[in-house]
């Protein structure tokens, strides 16, 4: 049994679930900055209230799994991204406080402050995650078994591009979630914002994909695409991944712009598919390295006896968390009732 491979799949799954679930409520938080009034803002936050804190469970599982299963990778990557990680955690904490306090604020200036804090914390967390992802993709400086780079190596034009792309992608997820959960004028505005975010995602999808190909020759070789030639033997087996992403962009745009009779859940499903196609493309580009392009999953993994013992615990806990998450989402399925949303 290849335990490092199994654990890499489990961690990748936890990270993907975090991106899809918490990315959605971070996107809603970003969109609260565009709300016309407190009533619309309250309706937005009510749509994520039952699930937003549980969504962050997957971030803990991803980070904890990396620490336990791949301690060498954790020891190298954490010093490389101390600043954006601290920014992300501070933003998530501040956002959580603002989520609770904004409903209890009595005076208008205080209410404006906490509304702004919820929006700002959501946006800052999304940008910080994009900076971490961009810095991870471009690789870190490693000497021996330690990080040997500078404190700001992660801050590059490429990581800034990825950060903006992640924030726009989260906005798309959040807007499509609001299409699913709201009705009337709020839903109509969510459709327009989702369509704008979708256009941004399409541009960012292409820009990040092309930029990633230039990061390292091994990525170009994996995809078989370079400025000099295109190797069809490599391109064709992998082409369904980007083609699926482009098709989903078109389908989501059709539902949001023209097919208003389409089921309200379909744009959100398409946006999830767009993220999955991008995630699969990233996996193809980087696998099997866990510290691009220095250390692979087998070099970074803990001993098999430790991985096996942790796998028993994961085999028990992960189904429980998945079942609980599915139950909560099913329990609060349906449209948000404006009369039950928080009012100031």
Image (cartoon, rainbow, N blue to C red):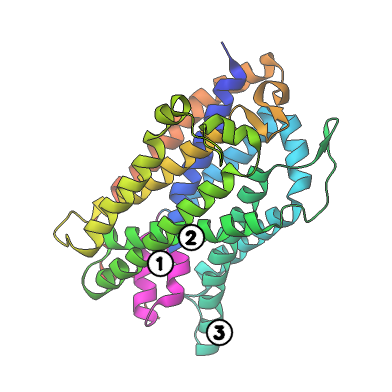
For the residue pair 256 and 281, the one nearer the viewer reads as 281
Q: Residue at x 64, y 20 (%)?
A: 307
Q: Residue at x 57, y 21 (%)?
A: 5
Q: Residue at x 46, y 42 (%)?
A: 17
For the residue pair 13 and 153, the one nearer the viewer reads as 153
For the residue pair 122 and 138, the one nearer the viewer reads as 138
The residue that mark 3 highlights is 110
**Measured from the top left, where is residue 71 in percent x and y?**
73, 30
Can the viewer see residue 332? no
The residue that mark 2 highlights is 26
Q: What is the number of the mark on residue 45?
A: 1
The answer to which of marks 1 and 3 sits earlier in the sequence is 1
- Secondary element type, mark 1: helix
Left-right relation of 316 to 310: left
Left-right relation of 66 to 278: right
Q: CA distance from mark 3 to mark 2?
A: 22 Å
């Amino acid at each position: 049994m290849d335990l490092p491979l199994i654990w890499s799949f489990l961690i990748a799954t936890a990270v993907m679930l975090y991106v899809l679930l918490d990315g959605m409520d971070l996107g809603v938080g970003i969109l609260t900055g565009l709300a016309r009034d407190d009533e619309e803002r309250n309706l937005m936050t009510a749509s994520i209230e039952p699930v937003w804190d549980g969504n962050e469970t997957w971030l803990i599982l991803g980070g904890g799994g990396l620490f336990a299963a791949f301690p060498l990778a954790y020891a190298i990557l954490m010093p490389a991204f101390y600043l954006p990680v601290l920014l992300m955690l501070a933003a998530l904490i501040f956002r959580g406080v603002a989520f609770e306090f904004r409903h209890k604020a009595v005076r208008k200036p205080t209410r404006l402050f906490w509304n702004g804090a919820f929006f700002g914390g959501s946006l800052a967390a999304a940008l910080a995650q994009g900076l971490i992802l961009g810095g991870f993709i471009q690789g870190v400086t490693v000497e021996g078994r330690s990080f040997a780079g500078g404190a700001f190596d992660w801050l590059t034009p490429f990581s800034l591009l990825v950060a903006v792309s992640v924030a726009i992608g989260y906005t798309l997820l959040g807007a499509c979630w609001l299409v699913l959960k709201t009705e009337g004028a709020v839903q109509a505005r969510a459709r327009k914002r989702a369509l704008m975010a979708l256009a941004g995602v399409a541009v960012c999808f292409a820009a990040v994909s092309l930029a990633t190909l230039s990061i390292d020759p091994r990525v170009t070789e994996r995809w078989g695409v370079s400025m000099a030639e295109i190797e069809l033997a490599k391109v064709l087996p992998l082409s369904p991944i980007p083609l699926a992403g482009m098709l989903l962009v078109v389908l989501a745009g059709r539902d949001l712009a023209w097919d208003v009779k389409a089921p309200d859940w379909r744009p959100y499903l398409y946006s999830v598919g767009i993220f999955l196609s991008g995630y699969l493309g990233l996996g193809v580009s980087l696998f099997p390295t866990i510290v691009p392009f220095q250390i692979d999953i087998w070099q970074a993994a803990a001993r098999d006896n430790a991985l096996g013992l942790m796998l028993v615990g994961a085999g028990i806990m992960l189904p429980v968390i998945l079942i609980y998450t599915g139950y909560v989402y099913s329990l609060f399925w349906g449209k948000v009732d404006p009369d039950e949303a928080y009012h100031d």
